[in-house]
Amino acid sequence: MQDVTKAQIKAIHTLKSRLNLPQDHYEAMLIRYGVESSKFLTKREATLLIKELKNLERKQLKEAVKSEDCKCSKSQLDWIADLWVKTSKDKDFEALRWFIKKITGKLYLYPETMTHKEANKVINALKGWKAKVHLRDGALAVTQ
């Protein structure tokens, strides 16, 4: 039996990092091969583990794509609210609703019902608006 290669160990640890795999989950995967560390795997076992980790990565990516159509997250809503307060002169909820309509094409009674993707569009629009306001205010300060 051939020993695991350095390239395989590197691939295993790279995949583990990209997956944000908890240590106990990773250790459980290794135990199935009868080892406590990837350096004790055979070349064949390492190949199988790499395939398993790549399959997990594919599943994770599929879930991420699916979640773009799901409702937006609380952190996205917090970010939108924070950017709105910092950027908007109106700062009222009704004005925010109409801003969201301008960006998404939909008038939401409650912003919480936006999709993940729509919330990202709103966040990016607010970031762009904030940057323009910041540049404009900086130019005014220089000329005064």
Image (cartoon, rainbow, N blue to C red):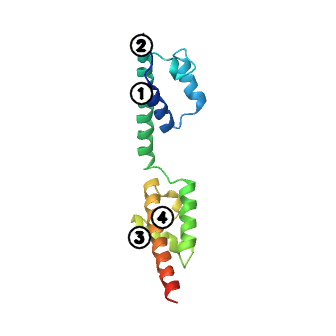
Q: Nearer the viewer, mark 1 or mark 3?
A: 1
The disc labelled 4 sits on which kind of residue?
Tyr
Tell me the CA gap for discs 4 and 2. 61 Å
Q: CA distance from mark 2 to mark 3?
A: 62 Å
Regarding mark 4 in the picture, which secondary structure is present there?
Answer: loop
**Disc 4 packing (10 Å; few <14; some 14–19; many ≥20):** some
User: Crowding at label 1, few (<14), some or many (≥20) Cα neighbours within 10 Å?
Assistant: few
Q: Amino acid at mark 3?
A: Lys
Between 31 and 124, the one lying in front of the other is: 31
Figure label count = 4
Element type where label 2 sits in the image: loop
Residue 57 lies, in percent from the top left, at 44, 35
Sequence-first tag of 4 and 2: 2
Q: Which residue is mark 4?
A: 108
Residue position for label 1:
7
Label number found at residue 2: 2
Please name the residue shown 45% across and 46% down the image. Answer: 67
| Mark before the other along the chain sequence, 1 or 3 | 1
Of residues 60 and 67, the one drawn nearer to the viewer in this rendering? 60
The Cα atoms of the two marked residues, 4 and 1, are separated by: 51 Å
Secondary structure of the residue carrying tag 3 is helix
- The reply to whether callout 1 and callout 3 are in contact (CB within 8 Å) is no
Q: Nearer the viewer, mark 4 or mark 1?
A: 1
For the point 59% across and 31% down, the residue is 23
Q: In the displayed image of the protein, which residue is found farthest to the front?
A: 6
Q: Which mark is residue 102?
A: 3
Quarter location, residue 125: bottom left
Judging from the image, what secondary structure is the residue with disc 1 in?
Answer: helix
Q: Quadrant of the N terminus?
A: top left
Calculate the distance from the C-alpha at mark 1 to the C-alpha at mark 3: 50 Å
Does residue 43 sit above or below 112 in this rendering?
above
Sooner in the amino-acid sequence: mark 4 or mark 1:
1
